[in-house]
Image (cartoon, rainbow, N blue to C red):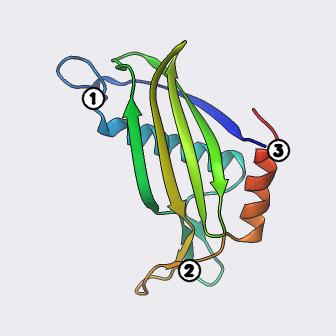
Amino acid sequence: MSCTFKTTRRVEFHETDMAGIVHFANFYKYMEQAEHEYFRSLGLTIVDKQADGSIIGWPRVSAQCSFESPACYGDLLEIRLNIERIGVKSLTIEYDLWRDETKIARGRMKTVCCQFTHGSPMQSIAIPERMLLKFEASMDQDE
């Protein structure tokens, strides 16, 4: 089973360096934007306010990116998100960034489901069943 969620974005001028090439830090932003769009496509949100006033969120515990080809101002990038693993408390997500037929970068992030109330420390929790069911259902189909 796999889940491939796809989205696109155009490289903006302010995301580039003096040579017109995307600054490496922006690839992490692109991956995070794809993650947020994926959550929204499932009817979920990254910051999920609960009835008791607590918030369920998804902080990253690891992030990496390997660069294969430069992306430049004006390029239209396709970001392909794939859920690599659903753990009890975490998601491991792979990202492939493409410009036409050229692979630009590959990334991976591990994010942990946490709950917190303002003024209290964040605690990792099991992924709530309503969310887990949506993640699992998305893995049964490719977009």
Quarter of the image containing the C terminus? top right
| Residue found at the very far top of the displayed protein | 101
Q: Residue at x 47, y 63 (%)?
A: 59
Residue 66 on image: x %, y %: 39, 34
Above or below, 6 against 62 in this view is above
The CA distance from mark 3 to mark 2 is 31 Å
Residue behind mark 3: 140
Above or below 125: residue 39: above
Residue 14, image quadrant: top left
Q: Secondary structure at mark 2?
A: loop
N-terminal of the pair, mark 3 or mark 1, is: 1
Kind of residue sitting beneath label 2:
Ser
Mark 1 sits on what residue?
Answer: 14
Q: Residue at x 21, y 25 (%)?
A: 17
> Is 20 or 55 nearer to us in this picture?
20
Residue 77 got which mark?
none
Q: Amino acid at mark 3?
A: Asp
In this orientation, which residue lies closer to the viewer: 91 or 28?
A: 91
Spatial CA span between label 1 and label 2: 36 Å
- Residue 87 shown left or right of residue 119 in the figure: right
According to the image, label 2 marks what residue?
54
Which badge, 3 or 2, comes first in the chain's sequence? 2
Name the secondary structure under disc 3: loop
